[in-house]
Image (spheres, helix red, strand yellow):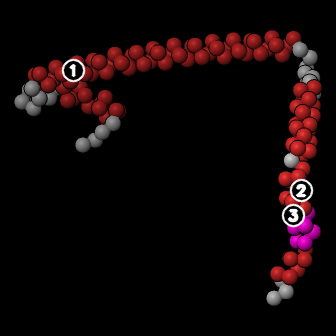
């Protein structure tokens, strides 16, 4: 049996016109009521869709007008303030320096190990190819 919205829409009048020996009168009424409800839902969906599209268009136009008025009120090349990023990076550098000073006794073996590994890496690489 075929399925789908388009098929049902096209075949519904033919189904309802079938002889009464195939479908009972009660079943025909139920199908007609359901078809009427279906049409009403389609109409409500279409009306709400058009209302939603109109509301979106109005909102986009308002945003565009607001953006245009803001853009026209400023110079063509707006300037950017650098004070906030500079203050942030200075504070981060100060926090890093404070952490290193407070943890210098704990960090010394790790830093020494990294330096030693960096310096001995060429020697280890050379020995690995010596086989």
Name the quadrant containing residue 123. Answer: bottom right
Q: Which residues are magenta?
A: 113-121
Labels 1 & 2 near each other (Cβ < 8 A): no
Residue 124: percent from left, percent from top: 86, 77
Camera-nearest residue between 128 and 16: 128
The verdict on residue 116 being magenta is yes
Please give the label number shown on residue 113.
3
Q: In the rendered image of this protein, does residue 110 appear above or below residue 45?
A: below
Q: Secondary structure at mark 3?
A: helix
Single out the mark in the foreground, 3 or 1.
3
Q: In the rendered image of this protein, does residue 71 appear above or below residue 10?
A: above
Q: Secondary structure at mark 2?
A: helix
Name the quadrant containing residue 41. Answer: top left
Q: Which residue is mark 1?
A: 32
Residue 7: percent from left, percent from top: 31, 34
Residue at the farthest left position: 21
Marks 3 and 1, how far apart at CA: 84 Å
Q: Is residue 125 left or right of residue 15?
A: right
Q: Is residue 116 left or right of residue 69?
A: right
């Amino acid at each position: 049996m075929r399925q789908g919205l388009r098929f049902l829409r096209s075949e519904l009048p033919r189904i309802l016109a079938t002889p009464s020996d195939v479908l009972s009168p009660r079943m025909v009424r139920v199908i007609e009521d359901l078809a009427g409800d279906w049409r009403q839902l389609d109409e409500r969906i279409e009306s709400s869709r058009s209302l939603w599209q109109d509301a979106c268009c109005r909102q986009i136009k308002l945003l565009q007008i607001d953006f245009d008025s803001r853009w026209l009120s400023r110079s063509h090349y707006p300037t950017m303030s650098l004070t906030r990023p500079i203050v942030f990076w200075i504070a981060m550098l100060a926090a890093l320096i404070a952490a290193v000073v407070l943890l210098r006794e704990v960090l010394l073996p790790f830093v020494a190990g990294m330096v030693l590994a960096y310096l001995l890496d060429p020697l280890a690489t050379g020995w690995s190819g010596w086989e």
